[in-house]
Image: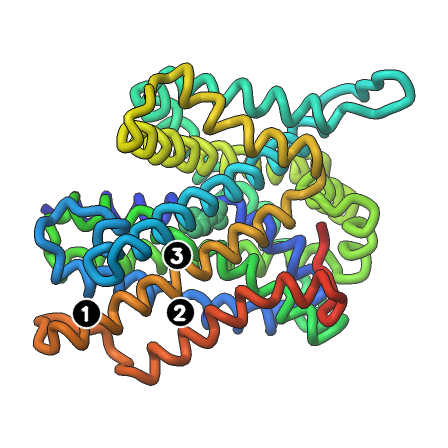
Amino acid sequence: MKNKILGSALMIAGTTIGAGMLAMPLTSAGMGFGATFALLLGLWLLLTYTGLLFMEVYQTAPRTDVGVASLAEQYFGMTGRILATFSLLVLLYALLSAYVTGGGSLLAGLLPTINIGEQDFTLQTGIILFTLLLGAFVVIGIKGVDGLTRVLFSGKIIAFMLVLLMMLPKVKVDNLLAIPLDNALIISAVPIFFTSFGFHVIMASINTYLEADIRKIRTAILLGTLIPLVAYVLWQLSTHGVLSQNEFTAILQADPSLNGLVKATRQITGSEILGEVVRIFSALALITSFLGVAMGIFEGIGDLLKRLNLPANRMSLAPLTFIPPLIFALFYPEGFIAALSYAGLLFAFYGLILPIGLAWRARRLHPNLPYRVAGGNLALVISLITGVIIMIIPFFIQWGFLPSVAG
Ligand SMILES: N[C@@H](Cc1ccccc1)C(=O)O
């Protein structure tokens, strides 16, 4: 029994820790550790809260194995179902695009320069190779992915420990005390930090797996979100503490990508090995998330095609899953952070506004549910306002009202 709770907590932590974590140092390079820490705590609280809201609403589901789209239909009719389904699919596509651009950038850093005519195609080659190699596992099926994930997940933990072990002793207090270059950067970074705490796309599976047992799910959510919080704080402590703000932002200006992070680590610490350990850790984090999200799209589109009575086999699903993110990545090979910001926009809907709406309705219709998340209407309203603000931030950055973050 205990095992299932722990397993669920690890699934939540595994889904949470991904590209967002890697993007964090890039986006927070200019905002100092203090503000970074406060932002981490606030967003952790917010997203744990909405995770619990999903669970509160699940108490009213007719069976233990209904998906979030069915819950949305139960409370908001067909419109609810369509909005939930499409926001989820577009969210997953945006995430996959981020993984492909990020993974491609890391892989390209290892390739020799590839020129076609005058043009440098190294990055594009990295992107295509990354997608083909890993996409193949997804197309072959869940068995291949399960095996690969186990190996990679252990590797990811070991690499992370190594990064911390090598970086924490080099932390300089002066670097941690650096004040933000511009206070508005803190607001610009919110969508990325927010997306880093996302896991809510697996709430339905967790509910089914733990047989809708509220106490178990609650423990799994709390533990599963605390692990990423601790990991993020330590990761930010090392990057902010080691990479001095001025040097780091200067290197990122020249190369605002994950490869830039690797370069900065190598140059500032003077350690070739540390740079490569950061590269390996980043690659493993991207690959494990890529596999999970790609499978999610594969299944989601499969369901959709079947509902529309269209053929759903591997040969039709593979291009539908991988071509859209590949097109994005080839057109915006440096769009790692941009793709994550789009993901943040959709996730603000799926992970905040949707559960708030569902809980609001559920509380009116079933006032005496055994479990209710603390905070009452005030918490619902504050979270809703935060969700709307998070959705607006990327537009404000685009219109020049807010400074843009690296990438
Ligand atoms: N938290 C994940 C992204 C994610 C967002 C929303 C839901 C699921 C996953 C990451 O950092 O990569």
Which residue in the structure is indicated by mark 1? 362
Which residue in the structure is indicated by mark 3? 350
From the viewer's perspective, is the residue at label 2 or at label 3 nearer?
3
Q: Is the CB of the residue bearing disc 3 within 8 angstroms of ligand 1? A: yes
Mark drawn on residue 161: none
- Looking at the rendering, which quadrant does residue 175 occupy? bottom right
| Mark 1 neighbour class, 10 Å CA radius: few under 14, some 14 to 19, many 20 or more | some
- Nearest the viewer among 280 and 77 is 77
Marks 3 & 1, CB-CB < 8 Å contact: no
Which residue in the structure is indicated by mark 2? 46
| Mark 2 neighbour class, 10 Å CA radius: few under 14, some 14 to 19, many 20 or more | some
Q: At label 1, which amino acid type do we have?
A: Ala
Decide which of tag 1 and tag 2 comes sooner along the chain.
2
Q: At label 2, which amino acid type do we have?
A: Leu
The residue tagged with tag 2: helix, strand or loop?
helix
Q: At label 3, which amino acid type do we have?
A: Tyr
Residue 333 percent across, percent down from the top left:
70, 36
